[in-house]
Amino acid sequence: GEDVEQSLFLSVREGDSSVINCTYTDSSSTYLYWYKQEPGAGLQLLTYIFSNMDMKQDQRLTVLLNKKDKHLSLRIADTQTGDSAIYFCAESKGGYQKVTFGTGTKLQVIP
Amino acid sequence: DAGVTQSPTHLIKTRGQQVTLRCSPKSGHDTVSWYQQALGQGPQFIFQYYEEEERQRGNFPDRFSGHQFPNYSSELNVNALLLGDSALYLCASSLTGGPYEQYFGPGTRLTVT
């Protein structure tokens, strides 16, 4: 079955790098996503990576995928207070398949 | 370009009642998915609509039903409300056959008392 796990909380100082980790169980996952949710808001798609990729970089965001260990990480460079939010890791088998989310990691950025 | 919109923003219902939530997808999108997000949890997939039919369904009882209209907008209906149905209901739209990116609306906060 599908299961996505994340640590619950991460605290970093402004200007440092943040690394949020995620593990998933379904080896047939094709797309892996990172979403951001700010208080009282819906989810914002930050980035996604195909399972045949190892890394994807998009401005301050770097996604690393270790398919063998089913481990996904999101690195945010030069973390800002505006990055404080809950970050969800998610996976799908692609196409129009449903997306399975983790429980979210709350990122706290200390000024 | 309007993104995904949902109505109402907040709703309070009594146990046993029925509720209808509405969603308009992002312009150009033809697929709508609904998710339930309980407090402190990640969203859970309810079902997905494409071409006015339910294409996929998550592990939710038949009390949860939906509809998609010819203009791609969608409704989520929940009958016989339980206290445990209190949650944020999120609608997401995407384009079948296009790049698989789901765009989420701001959600409807349902409180069942």
Image (tube, coloured by chain):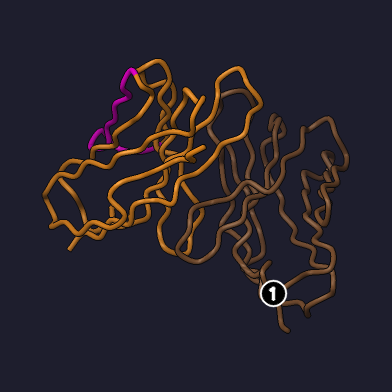
Would you say residue A44 sits in the magenta stretch?
no
Q: Colour of chain A?
A: brown
Name the subunit of mark 1. A
**Other-residue count near label 1 (Cα within 10 Å), few / some / many at <14 / 14–19 / ≥20:** some
Residue A84 percent location from the top left of the image:
64, 70
Q: What stretch is highlighted in magenta?
A: B59-70
Residue A60 percent location from the top left of the image:
82, 57
Relative to the observer, which residue lies in front, B42 or B69? B69
**Image height check: is A29 above or below B35?**
above
Relative to the observer, which residue lies in front, B30 or A93? B30
Q: Which chain is orange?
A: B
Quarter of image, res A61: bottom right
The residue indicated by pointer 1 is: A81
Q: In which quarter of the image is the C terminus of chain B?
A: bottom left
Would you say residue B64 sits in the magenta stretch?
yes
Relative to the observer, which residue lies in front, A51 or A85? A85
The structure residue drawn at horizontal position 82% and vertical position 39%, both measured from the top left corner, is A67
A55 left or right, relative to B10: right
The structure residue drawn at horizontal position 56% and vertical position 36%, both measured from the top left corner, is B102
Residue B22 percent location from the top left of the image:
30, 39
Q: Which residue lies furthest to the front in this view?
A: B1
Instruction: Residue type at mark 1: give it.
Output: Thr
